[in-house]
Amino acid sequence: MGRPALCPSLNAFFFILMFTRVSPKYISKGVAMRTYCRLFHRFRPYQRSNPKRKHFVACSTSNLKTNASNATSMILPATPDSIPAAISSLREGKVIAVATDTIYGIAAHAEIKEGVDRLYAIKRRPRDKPLAISVGHVIDLQKYANVSILPPGLLSELLPGPVTICIPKRADTHALRPEVISKLGKIALRVPATDFMQTLCKELGAPVALTSANLSGESSCTRIEEFSSIWPELALILEAPNDAFRGKPAQGSTIVDFHTPEEYRILRYGESEVVERIRRVLARYGFTELHLSEE
């Protein structure tokens, strides 16, 4: 009669995994799988002695195993206390999920091959599509790009913010992975307007390769649940406050390509207000917008 008493404990654990978000402070891949194994092996004698329960046990343990595997990614708040864990993962060549000033992204160390390779694999992104890189401060852009082609003060008016700038790479910059450099020798640069992302890049001491947290061709995400299918492939998920994206459309940054020192073109449109602000700033600096049909 003592065996059936094990059912509630198994169901309770299964219920917790199914209907609550698992905090990394209390569970990780190892903890989840150890707990699963303990419950499974503890429950097996009851399964053998109760043939009528075999189907229930098979279904429950299968679901439990699936949900335990979903807990392989650690979910941490995007706060200063989480920076060390994020840096450690990036330096180990792993991929993490981060909240930018527009949408959720996935990031890797831009100078480590294993991390960049993982980023492409998780994203299912064609290798001929370069990745953007994110840095901690506007002044850091000059370490990687030839900012001298732009008027002084321009970048500080556009960044930090939901803008990606495409300009030529510095000829003497060799640390970046080739996957972040276009065939034309340009790199796409970001300085997201979030304290967490800026601090992460500054303390990492290197740029991070960044792309949206969704499979190629799918919609962008403003909630971590929207990219749960890739959680098992991530080392960390840095979650923003619940209201971080409230009232914002799920749109990425506006990508501005400086075609020549006097002309620019918009390769991707973000929020309309951002696009108009960019146009006003560039017009004030004497730039002309070049549309694709005019090339």
Image: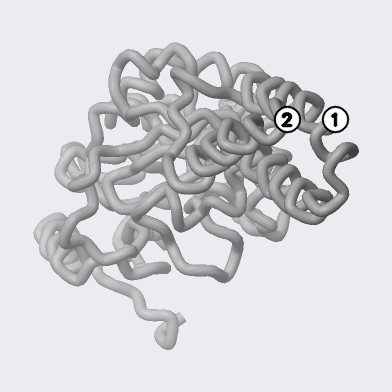
Task: Identify which residue is drawn at 60% across, 54% down.
Answer: 229
Q: Where is residue 99 drawn, in percent x and y?
A: 36, 41
Task: Name the residue beneath numbered marker 1.
Answer: 45
Q: Are marks 1 and 2 in contact (CB under 8 Å)?
A: yes
Q: In the structure shown, which secondary structural element does the residue marked by tag 1 occupy?
A: helix
Q: Which residue is mark 2?
A: 3
3 or 288, nearer to the observer: 3
Q: Residue at x 44, y 28 (%)?
A: 23
Number of marks in the rendered image = 2
Amino acid type at image mark 1: Pro
Q: Could you tell me which residue is drawn at 71 percent across and 40 percent down?
A: 65
Q: Specify which label sits upstream in the sequence, 1 or 2.
A: 2
Residue 102 is situated, as x and y percent measured from the top left of the image, at 30, 52
Crowdedness of circle 2 by 10 Å Cα count: few (<14), some, many (20+)? some
- Foreground residue among 159 and 248: 248
- Mark on residue 154? none
Residue under the point 36% across and 79% down: 291
Dot 2 amino acid type? Arg
Where 284 falls versus 76 (above or below)?
Answer: below
Q: Is residue 210 left or right of residue 138?
A: right
**100, 237: nearer the viewer:** 237
